[in-house]
Image: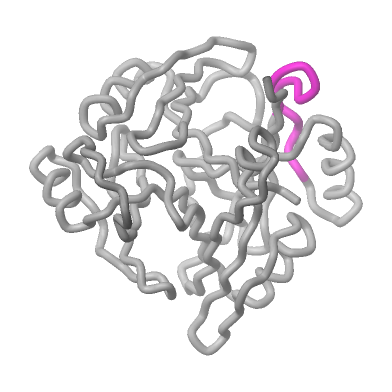
Amino acid sequence: MYRWDGGFIMVEPEEYEEAVEWYQETLGWKYMDQITSYVGRKAFMKLPRSGMVTIKSFEGEYEHFTALEKQGNVKLVFATYDLNKTLQYLLENNVIHTEVSQLPSGQRYCDIIAYGQTPITIAEEPRGEDNSEYHPSGIVGFGTVNSIIFVKEPETSATWYEKHLGFEIVEVNNAKGYAHLQTEDAYDRNVLNERFLDHVWLVQSSEIVETPNDNKARIYYDIRPEVFFEEYNNLIRSGIKPSEIAGDPINGWGGFHFYDPDHNRVNVWSYKVN
């Protein structure tokens, strides 16, 4: 199973320091550390409630870190408890947003246009028993919905993700144009040795990008180093063409990507758990 594991927010090399500062000041994410390696610079940002996201520069000689011109239809989703309040704060800070839409679950979501014209998806969820005080942006972390992927035919795509990534199909509704999938959370499995399922929504859309595409806010799915090359070769045997491998998945960090039938980019990484 390919497990959901957060992702990278990609920035231009010359904008790296300014981007890290913007996410701290505007969204209230906390800078923890950074490293520079053969795959470029990475800054680790702790989200206010829980979770970590990485600001990554478009650096290195690997195809995997090349910026494509076409904006894709895969959404890395962050949570807010009050969408209206969050959008009002962002507008006051000159951050615009797209039209608010609704998932089949009833959750409202939209994109905000973050630093460097980067679309970041936020979805509203209940606060529950969380009484903590957060930054005025209200973007608290990853939420109950982690991935939104736009596709032509939800049933066909759900079967594809089940076959090639091991996702579990919860529900497919052709009439309403969606499929609800789940996959394990990598942190819970790899660090806590527990099973926790994250939610993935496939939403029907006629606005499919017909060429390979990319998102600056990239979802990554985790596979473990001991099965990395086996899974990579399984994709090839299945007729899928993954990119070259970036980095070193056995001794450090390694990643690659491939595309689903709607040209949506699927990013994969592997790393040693300390």
Q: Residue at x 26, y 26 (%)?
A: 22
Q: Residue at x 73, y 38 (%)?
A: 243
118 to the left or right of 96: right
Of the pair 124 and 255, the residue shown nearer to us: 124
Colour scheme of the rendered structure? one colour
Of the pair 136 and 255, the residue shown nearer to us: 136
The chief SS type of the magenta part is loop
Q: Is residue 85 magenta?
A: no
Of the pair 32 and 151, the residue shown nearer to us: 32
In the image, is residue 212 above or below residue 37?
below
Q: Residue at x 22, y 26 (%)?
A: 25
Quick check: can you spot residue 71? no
Spot occupied by residue 143 in the image (x, y as percentages of width and height)? 42, 51
Spot occupied by residue 117 in the image (x, y as percentages of width and height)? 31, 39
Residue lying at the far bottom in this picture: please name it: 175
Q: Tell me which corner region of the image, top left, top right, bottom left or bottom right, holds residue 187.
A: top right
**Total residue callouts:** 0
Spot occupied by residue 182 in the image (x, y as percentages of width and height)? 62, 61
72 to the left or right of 164: left
Question: Magenta span covers which residues?
Answer: 242-254
Quick check: can you spot residue 4? yes
